[in-house]
Image (tube, rainbow, N blue to C red):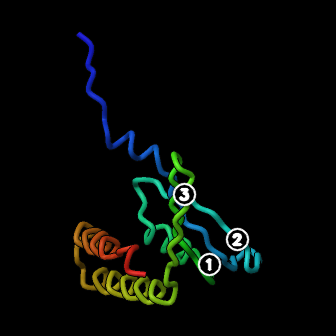
Amino acid sequence: MVNTNTNTNQEQKSLFKERIKFYADTPSGDVNKLFCFKIKSILSVREAIWRFMAKNWNIRSAWYEKINLTTGEVENTRINIPVEINNYAYCKINIEQMRKQGISLEKQKTYYEAALHDFNINSY
């Protein structure tokens, strides 16, 4: 007997291409260079932005791009970088305080994941 069930979630994911694009200055000396980074199911938009901030990249402007591969429709949403800089700094400070207080790594991870989850791309 052959399994004829299909995974509709997997089919729907393949219909869209998601990525962030941003202009940034890098520690290696690139100035106002355009970068494009694919968003995979593991990474959220916020986590991708925060990873570059953690590497001391100065992100000037950024946007989320969603492309419908069936129709070719492109949806761009601006990301508010000043807000993300504040969110990243606040989260970083709180995790550092948790470390100093001896709070477990598991609780630090839970806090970090909750901070990432609070991000709503449609709020911009």
Q: Residue at x 50, y 57 (%)?
A: 18
Disc 2 to disc 3, C-alpha distance: 22 Å
Circles 2 and 1 in contact, beta carbons < 8 Å: no
Q: Residue at x 31, y 39 (%)?
A: 8
Q: Which residue bears the numbered disc 2?
A: 34
Q: Position of residue 64 (x, y in %)?
A: 52, 69
Disc 2 to disc 1, C-alpha distance: 12 Å
Circles 3 and 1 in contact, beta carbons < 8 Å: no
Quadrant of the image containing the N terminus: top left
Q: Nearer the viewer, residue 53 or 118?
A: 118
Q: Which residue bears the numbered disc 1?
A: 57
**13 to 45, vertically: above or below:** above
Amino acid marked by disc 2:
Leu
Q: Which residue bears the numbered disc 3?
A: 73
Q: Please tell me whether mark 2 sits on a helix, a strand or a loop.
A: strand
Circle 2 or circle 3, nearest the eye = 3
Which numbered disc, 2 or 1, marks the residue that appears first in the sequence? 2
**30 to 89, vertically: above or below:** above
Q: Position of residue 58 (x, y in %)?
A: 62, 82
Q: Position of residue 124 (x, y in %)?
A: 43, 81
Q: Please tell me whether mark 3 sits on a helix, a strand or a loop.
A: loop
**19 to 104, vertically: above or below:** above
**46 to 69, vertically: above or below:** below
Dot 1: few (<14), some (14–19), or many (≥20) neighbours within 10 Å? some
**Which label sits on residue 77?**
none
Amino acid marked by disc 1:
Trp
Q: Would you identify the image quadrant in which residue 103 lies?
A: bottom left
Which numbered disc, 2 or 3, marks the residue that appears first in the sequence? 2
Left or right of 41 in this view: 4: left
Circle 3 or circle 1, nearest the eye = 3
